[in-house]
Image (tube, rainbow, N blue to C red):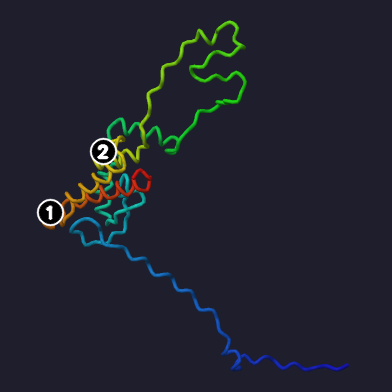
Amino acid sequence: MYTHNVSPMNLNSRIFDRIRTKAKEQPAPAAEHPPCAHPGCAAVGEFRAPMGRLREGQYFCFCLTHVREYNATYNYFNGMSDADVALYQKEAVIGHRPTWTMGVNRAARGFREEGAEPQESDPLGMFRARQRRPAEPKGPKYGLAVMKALTTLGLDDTADAEAIKNRYKEWVKRLHPDANAGDRSREDKLREIIQAYNYLRTAKIV
């Protein structure tokens, strides 16, 4: 029987020097925070705070002291009437989505439109004797978000696209710093006007 002698492995061989080992993963650098958005504050803005209604998804960055001050006075419904708040809360139950009446089958036998003559299957006139229900008051023409955008522009739901465009141009001319000798004190109002108009464009009202 032929046997082959295997020499022991030399761990000091240069062959092992060519073997690359996986480098240790370096921890990701910490994200840099913007400065605090509070005027005059030089601290780091580590904490986010929502900008408010009609600016969902946008945030201010504050330091701990100023985010506490902001949260203490923050009110999402600021500037809304009691009726608007009640309507918003009602729509929030269904996620601000449209609803339809359940259980109405117009193809079913015996279905009768409002004001139509009774079916022949009503020989005793029971449907004829029943009084009609008073018409329910019509709801707002648009949803709450669109109505708030129109209100920000100083308009109501009767305004058409042309009226909205004209009112937007009036606001921009009135509030823009270039039209006020560089005065930037009304930029917040101008920003609200621009955001309201852009929302109406997104909603295809304009």
Per the rendering, the mark at residue 153 is: none
Q: Three-letter amino acid code at disc 1?
A: Asn
Q: Position of residue 113 (x, y in %)?
A: 52, 20
Q: Kindly give the residue lying farthest to the left in the view shown.
A: 181
- Residue 153: image quadrant is top left
Q: Position of residue 24 (x, y in %)?
A: 49, 76
Q: Residue at x 40, y 35 (%)?
A: 91
| First-in-chain label (1 vs 2) | 2
Q: Closer to the camera, 82 or 3?
A: 82
Q: Residues within 10 Å of mark 1 (few under 14, many from 20)?
A: few
75 versus 141 height, above or below: below
Judged left or right of residue 50, residue 113 is: right
Q: Position of residue 94 (x, y in %)?
A: 45, 36
Give how far apart the Cα atoms at labels 1 and 2 are: 24 Å
Judged left or right of residue 21, residue 141 is: left
Mark 1 — residue? 180
Q: Closer to the camera, 72 or 75?
A: 75
38 versus 20 height, above or below: above
Q: Secondary structure at mark 1?
A: loop
Q: Closer to the camera, 54 or 125?
A: 125
Q: Three-letter amino acid code at disc 2?
A: Leu
Per the rendering, the mark at residue 155 is: 2
Q: Closer to the camera, 136 or 71?
A: 136
Q: Position of residue 166 (x, y in %)?
A: 24, 45
- Residue 98: image quadrant is top left
- Residue 154: image quadrant is top left
Q: Residue at x 25, y 44 (%)?
A: 73
Q: Residue at x 49, y 31 (%)?
A: 100
